[in-house]
Image: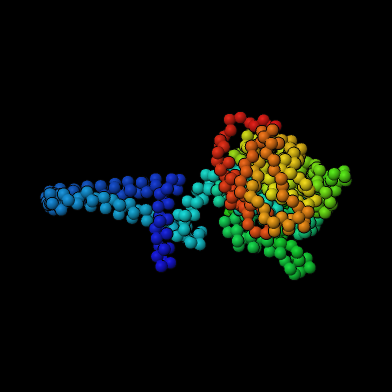
């Protein structure tokens, strides 16, 4: 029964070769024309051979054409022959493609499905997403089902754990958040994610490091540049999009708390009680990659968050070239509000406090804000309360007063953490991107 279902699924996939954009119908047409010309030439040759005695050919044909059977079923016979010819031609082309692709694909029977999906995703909107941590990788995991024109711009200021050790030893940006995003955009996320996130438990020098962090570090040493290492990985991993660091230079965060104390380093800032007032970069003006600014220029939609506001979302926006591009882009900017506050970072923040901090650091408001309306269950509320976090409260009036359009929906995911459902959030953002003009008529005025 399973083999029968697989066979019918294979037959059903054959129609995909003839869908728009696959680039097959034109070749089928050319092949059909070639066959017709070949038959015409063959018939002409036969007629020439029997030119002195053509009745040998014409009499049997005439007998068929004047028969009652032909009168009754001639049209259906012609239709059947035509359909058989079309099916045979399509199957032949499909088998040819399958044979050619067998050296590159593990299951060439899926060639039509895979190529059709890739073509469909390649027509999706250009989306650039900024952030880091689990928030960005979770977002990418959903968006990759709607478009392959994705660019993830990842914060590289983490100074703890494996990333912190590698930063200090090799003077490179933090690679940790990059590995999560690389796995999220992979067509084979489960295996690649398991490989990249594997953390060594033995070995004095390797213990605590993840394979992904070591891979990026190794490529940086081989290629001589952190940005070039990520370009190489984007090519090698055949991602449904691209992943780039906010800067190819090591970046540290200088955080100001309400007591005006300045704290250098992301880890130390989080451990210091109280919300963050401002954040800045050290060095002040790290350089971005040209691929990042180019992606912003071509974007239909730019997504900020979800994720830690001051340590994931804002740092990439403070890179001068990125900041300037976001001020001149014609793309719409949407900010995804976190569901919960974060202890040591956004203590006591309401939704509009996040927007105010974004404006203070970036110099402009977003055009849209996405807010979760699902109720967080008591068990999760209690777990977050033990960590000093609470639900981010939302009031619509401050958003309306400055012209920010809010998109409210049931976006809470399952599981122990109060995180966004990647599929639901991606659907909201895709619908928003699809509703926007591909080429805005004029630049957006900074608010």
The relative height of residue 162 versus residue 121 in the rendered view (above or below) is below
Give the residue at x 25% y 47%: 40
Residue 99: image quadrant is bottom left
Most foreground residue, 277 or 73: 277
Residue 421, given in percent of the width and then of the height, sits at 62, 52
Q: How is the image coloured?
A: rainbow
Left or right for 407, reference 316: left
**Residue 236 can be seen in this image:** no
Left or right for 40, reference 360: left
Seen as rendered, the residue at the extreme bottom is 202
Residue 425, given in percent of the width and then of the height, sits at 61, 48
**Residue 349 can be seen in this image:** yes
Left or right for 365, reference 241: right
Most foreground residue, 246 or 337: 337
The relative height of residue 304 versus residue 6 in the rendered view (above or below) is above
Number of marks present in the image shown? 0
The relative height of residue 224 versus residue 7 in the rendered view (above or below) is above
Left or right for 253, reference 38: right
Q: Quadrant of the N terminus?
A: bottom left
Q: Quadrant of the C terminus?
A: top right
Residue 350: image quadrant is top right
Most foreground residue, 356 or 351: 351
Give the residue at x 72% y 66%: 200
Seen as rendered, the residue at the extreme front is 378
Give the residue at x 47% y 58%: 110
Residue 335: image quadrant is top right
Give the residue at x 78% y 41%: 285
Residue 277, given in percent of the width and then of the height, sits at 81, 43
Residue 136, given in percent of the width and then of the height, sits at 66, 50
């Amino acid at each position: 029964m399973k083999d029968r279902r697989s066979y019918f699924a294979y037959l059903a996939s054959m129609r995909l070769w003839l869908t728009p954009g696959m680039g097959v119908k034109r070749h089928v047409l050319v092949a059909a024309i070639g066959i017709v010309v070949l038959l015409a030439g063959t018939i002409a040759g036969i007629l020439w051979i029997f030119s002195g005695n053509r009745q040998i050919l014409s009499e049997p044909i005439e007998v068929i054409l004047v028969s009652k059977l032909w009168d009754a079923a001639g049209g259906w016979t012609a239709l059947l022959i035509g359909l058989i010819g079309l099916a045979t031609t399509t199957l032949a082309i499909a088998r040819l493609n399958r044979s050619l692709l067998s050296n590159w694909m593990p299951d060439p029977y899926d060639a039509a499905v895979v190529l059709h999906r890739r073509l469909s995703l390649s027509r999706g909107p250009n989306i650039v997403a900024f952030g880091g941590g689990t928030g960005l990788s979770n977002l990418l995991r959903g968006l990759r089902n709607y478009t392959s024109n994705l660019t993830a711009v990842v914060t590289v200021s983490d100074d703890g754990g494996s990333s912190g050790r590698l930063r200090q030893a090799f003077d490179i940006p933090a690679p940790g958040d990059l590995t999560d995003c690389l796995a999220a955009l992979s067509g084979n996320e489960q295996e690649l994610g398991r490989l990249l996130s594997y953390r060594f438990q033995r070995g004095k020098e390797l213990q605590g490091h993840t394979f992904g962090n070591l891979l990026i570090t190794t490529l940086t040493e081989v290629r001589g540049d952190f940005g070039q290492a990520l370009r190489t990985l984007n090519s090698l991993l055949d991602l449904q999009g691209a992943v780039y660091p906010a800067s190819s230079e090591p970046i540290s965060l200088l955080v100001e708390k309400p007591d005006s104390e300045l704290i250098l380093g992301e880890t130390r800032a989080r451990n210091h009680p109280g919300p963050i007032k401002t954040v800045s970069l050290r060095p002040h003006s790290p350089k971005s990659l040209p691929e990042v600014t180019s992606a912003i220029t071509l974007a239909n939609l730019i997504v900020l968050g979800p994720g830690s506001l001051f340590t994931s979302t804002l740092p990439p926006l403070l890179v001068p070239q990125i900041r300037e591009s976001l001020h001149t882009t014609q793309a719409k900017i949407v900010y995804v509000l976190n569901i919960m506050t974060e202890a040591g970072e956004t203590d006591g923040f309401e939704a509009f406090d996040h927007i105010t901090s974004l404006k203070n650091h970036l110099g402009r408001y977003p055009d849209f804000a996405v807010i979760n309306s699902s109720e967080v269950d008591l068990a999760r509320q209690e777990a977050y309360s033990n960590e000093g976090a609470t639900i981010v409260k939302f009031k619509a009036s401050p958003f309306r007063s400055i012209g920010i359009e809010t998109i409210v929906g049931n976006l809470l995911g399952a599981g122990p953490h109060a995180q966004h459902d990647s599929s639901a959030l991606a659907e909201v953002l895709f619908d928003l991107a699809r509703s926007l003009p591909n080429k805005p008529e004029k630049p957006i005025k900074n608010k």
